[in-house]
Image (cartoon, rainbow, N blue to C red):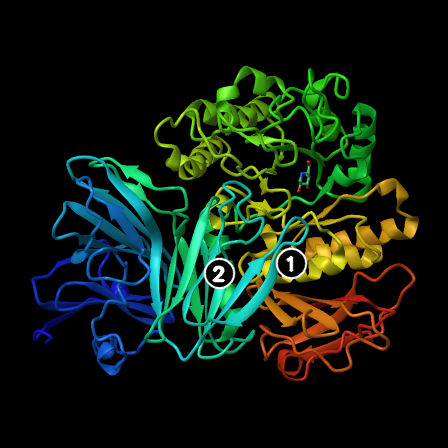
Amino acid sequence: MRRTQKKLIIPVCLTMAGMLAAATSYAQTVTIPVETQNNALVLQTDGDKNLKMVYFGHKLGNAKEYESILGMYKQADDSGVLNDAYMPSGSASLAEPAITVTHADGNKSLNLVYVSHTVTKIDDDISLLTVNLKDPAYPFEVTLYYKTYFKEDVTEQWSVIKHNEKGVVTLNKFASANLNLKGNGFWLKQYHGNWALEMQPEEAKLTHGIKTIDSKLGTRANLYEPSMFMVSMDQPATEDEGKVMLGALEWSGNFKIDLELDVSNNLRVIAGMNNAASEYHLKPGEDFTTPAFVYTYSDHGKGDASRKLQRWARKYKIVDGEGDRLTLLNNWETTYFDFNEAKLADLMKDTKKLGVDMFLLDDGWFGNSHPRNGDNAGLGDWQENKQKLPNGISSLVKEATANGVKFGIWIEPEMVNPTSDLYVKHPDWVIKQPNRPEKYFRNQLVLDLANPQVQDFVYGVVDNLFTKNPTLAYIKWDCNAVIYNAYSAYLKKDQSHLYIEYVRGLYKVLERVRAKYPKVPLMLCSGGGGRVDYGALKYFTEFWPSDNTEPLERVFIQWEYSFFYPAMTSSNHVTDWGKQPLKFRTDVAMMGKLGFDIVVGRLSENDLAYVHGALKSYDYLKDAIWHGDQYRLQSPWDNDAASIMYVNDSKTKAVMFNYLVNNRYGTGTKVPIRLKGLDPQKKYQVKEINLYPGNNSSIGNNLAFTGDFLMNVGINPDVNSGRTSVVIQLDEAK
Ligand code: DGJ
């Protein structure tokens, strides 16, 4: 029997700046709508003060009506055990838990009841809701945090766990968030991959039981699957239609996302750090903070949801998300480890000749007793190799400056080759089992970032480079190995903390780097896209999506990343992978942060003229590509041609990229492609750009159409086997 309940409703966004604290008495229902511009997530207590999540979707016009939601459901779960806002375990809650603990006395039961909540309005856009829960039987508390970005419709959710028991409590599971979704069926889009095969999508209807996306790799955690995913409700969402939630864990280590379709046909999404081999011993009075799970929701399809996430990332998460980026020439694929000062001097001249901002020196510049002439030695010994670079990095920086370009450098400071001085000097800094044979990934082992001395060392690698070379303009931070044989000499009895303390140690280092060098561009690389997540991207300006730069492949890879990350974070390099012409390769790389890794000397005069023209266009359009809205117009998965466009904020400038992705006879764009995001009232001049010297556009000259026409009829880029990549620029006609 339910008690008669008094009702109290407190909408998060309506509360006054930094003030509301509501404590309630027993048998009073508290309803807490967590609202953003378009959406709401609603929490509500039941008669026993258990906190439930009762709604997730489009926000209601009348917040009072949130109270009536639950009454409309007559599902099998009368006992109410399935919709906890943060499911404990071992007591009355019996579904997959968000949290499992072993109390100091060995008892494994946990119950969490609502105590109070507070809303703090951080600014016009951001609010922070905290909800305090406690166990009535033990001095054990969990605080749930919901940080909402009103305009962007984005929420970051995490939890803080603490206790005052008489001894250590073991946390066996510790999710960041536990969402309950209602719908007439749920479709999960997830990703799998491997080296050079990142972001391979799969979408399927969820069946009853638990589907798990996880990683146990420690470092390079996304190698086989990343934590990003989307869930469509009622039917599979398309680009512009349907209800869809996009989510990702802001964590660069092991993660676990459980999607449980329960007996009542509701979906529970439990996201957090992976608890596998990671039980955590929490001392009395200590806080255990979980990483944020970031999510957004749209009832206008995946495109709208992804633009929300992209806007949020640019404004609030990535470093300098509203700033500039550097174009560059990288030497990795043109020299690999085989270079010297003379070769690099030529490459810096080439950088200038190509017309990009910076030269990026990749792997192979360090190690003396064990020179880094291959991937089997030298990692850890961060001194310039005297044979290759007798005058050191500083002379290279000078050389770059003399050529009028900037200089950037590659490091992989978390790793060590057993063939290195560092390994011999500090065997206790290396993650490896004392009583088992070493197992290598790319001939290397991982340094133990749980150890503060190792943190100092890794920070020192970065700090030394900048201290010695104050004009150093850029760092590419790589991370190629996974953690095998997880054991930390530093952590001693707390071995199960290693996976967590490693990532915390990494973030401590990155915090220090950013405290001293707040804006310097850093590229997040992990043998390709092995570590693309918002936990790390908080410290980086961009990421390396994949070592696979074959441009056809890249159309697909970049397409999928773009659901979660803004174009300006995607470092796209023109390389010699594949058989596509230079124009195709460059056009594809322009859909993000453009770079090159090619032998400039091998470019013909026409090639060079084409690149110069493309760079000029890029300079003109980069504001729309980097800071504007992206629209995926036509998917490469279902069409002969893929089409993507970017529009600047004032809708005065746009660019549309089109690529042939099918080589069968007679394929091409037979019908116009409808544009999106333009102003229907504005008239746009439409012209093809990035034409290879000697080629004329087949779409015509002096074209001008209204946004209305372009969005309802569209434009045919005339992609065909003779025109495999077509870039179209749109400017408001003045
Ligand atoms: C892996 C990266 O993904 C590549 O771009 C390159 O930097 C190599 N490492 C260097 O070893």
For the C terminus, the image quarter is: bottom right
Q: Residue at x 79, y 50 (%)?
A: 577
Q: CA distance from mark 1 to mark 2?
A: 16 Å
Instruction: Tell me if residue 589 can be seen.
Output: yes
Amino acid type of disc 2? Leu
User: Identity of the amino acid at label 1?
Assistant: Gln
Residue indicated by mark 2: 309
Q: Which residue appears at 76% of the width and 54% of the height?
A: 550
Vertical comparison of 447 with 39: above or below: above
Q: Where residue 730 appears, x then y in whole percent?
A: 69, 69
Ligand 1: quadrant of the figure: top right
Please report the residue visible at 73 percent of the width from the left and 39 percent of the height from the top.
330
Q: Quadrant of residue 411?
A: top right
Seen in the picture, residue 212 relative to 596 is either above or below; the reply is: below
Asked if the residue at label 1 sits under 8 Å from ligand 1, the reply is no
Residue with the mark numbered 1: 558
Instruction: Measuring from the top left, give residue 12's x and y in whole percent.
Output: 26, 63
Marks 1 and 2, the one that precedes in the sequence: 2
